[in-house]
Amino acid sequence: MLTYREQIPIGPVRAVVLRFWMMRSAGLAEPERIVPDGCPELIFNLADPFDRIRDHGKHRQAGTLLVGQLPSAIRIASTGRVDLFGIRFEPHGLASLTGIAAHTVTDLDLDASDVDRPLAFALRDAVASGAFAERCLRASGVLDSAMSRRPTDPGAWLAREAVDAAERGDTLSIDQIAHRIGANRRTVERAFRSHVGLTPKRFLRIARIRRVIADLERGGVSLSGLAARHGFADQPHLTREFGQLAGVTPGAYLAERTPFDACLVGADAN
């Protein structure tokens, strides 16, 4: 049985953290597909390790894991019991909190202690045990303290405004985003690179496919209807875009979905 819970933070930390989450299970039977959601994460593995599966093999993920932006889907596999506590950042949140250049960790999963050792250790201590709500409260305290020590970053505001504009529409262009926030195209592109870790075009594609996935999960709409709803030229266009980001067709994605997928898609749809 898989148990999943999440909590939206309150207070100052909400500016950089989208949600806290936890997941427990006796194990995952098959490798799981992780489709990009436009958000970096810190994941604390309190049980058996996970492997990231690549075309040329696999590697063991760290127990205190920083996951940068994913440009396309990856696959992971549990090696036993699952007990995870996650911090899903706003798209710009990790860079705003730590000062790290987001593009330097894109498509990487790293030991978080190699990036910010004091923060990683403090957060692991905060979430290692206790009721979920208590762990979220302690993690918020650690993150609030870290935020208070960061100097003001004008680029963070620009990245946040650009991300908000991008997430509000399926068919916005980069130039339209720039116009909405009163910046030029090049400034928006730099803000995305340094604070989000993706190009604006890639981020827009990910945001649109996540909305398609949420509609797929709800059902009741044909692929041609989804294509029209989300601004694709036609159904083949939707299928190509979906495959490039998710690694499978929409139909294959639905066929292989698991309770693990349902938890993550449900979180995105909230």
Image (spheres, rainbow, N blue to C red):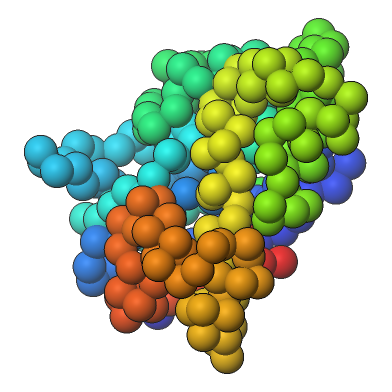
Q: Is residue 124 above or below residue 30?
A: above
For the C terminus, give its image quadrant.
Answer: bottom right
| Left or right side of 35 for 85 | right
Q: Is residue 15 above or below residue 252?
A: above
Which residue is drawn at the image coordinates 54% and 30% (left, top)? 198
| Left or right side of 235 for 174 | right
Q: Nearer the viewer, residue 117 or 227?
A: 227
- Residue 230, how many percent across, how many down? 63, 65
Residue that sits furthest to the left in the current view:
56
- Residue 255, how many percent across, how many down? 32, 80
Residue that sits furthest to the front in the current view:
233
| Left or right side of 105 for 10 | right
The picture quadrant where one finds residue 186 is top right
Which residue is drawn at the image coordinates 43% and 76% (left, top)? 259
Which residue is drawn at the image coordinates 48% and 79% (left, top)? 223
- Residue 243, how many percent across, how many down? 35, 58
State whether residue 145 appears in this view: no
Q: Nearer the viewer, residue 89 or 149?
A: 89
The picture quadrant where one finds residue 201 is top right
Q: Nearer the viewer, residue 52 or 168?
A: 168
The picture quadrant where one finds residue 170 is bottom right
- Residue 115, how many percent across, how many down? 48, 17
For the N terminus, give its image quadrant.
Answer: bottom left
Which residue is drawn at the image coordinates 65% and 37% (left, top)? 91
State whether residue 172 appears in this view: yes
Q: Is residue 217 above or below residue 113?
A: below
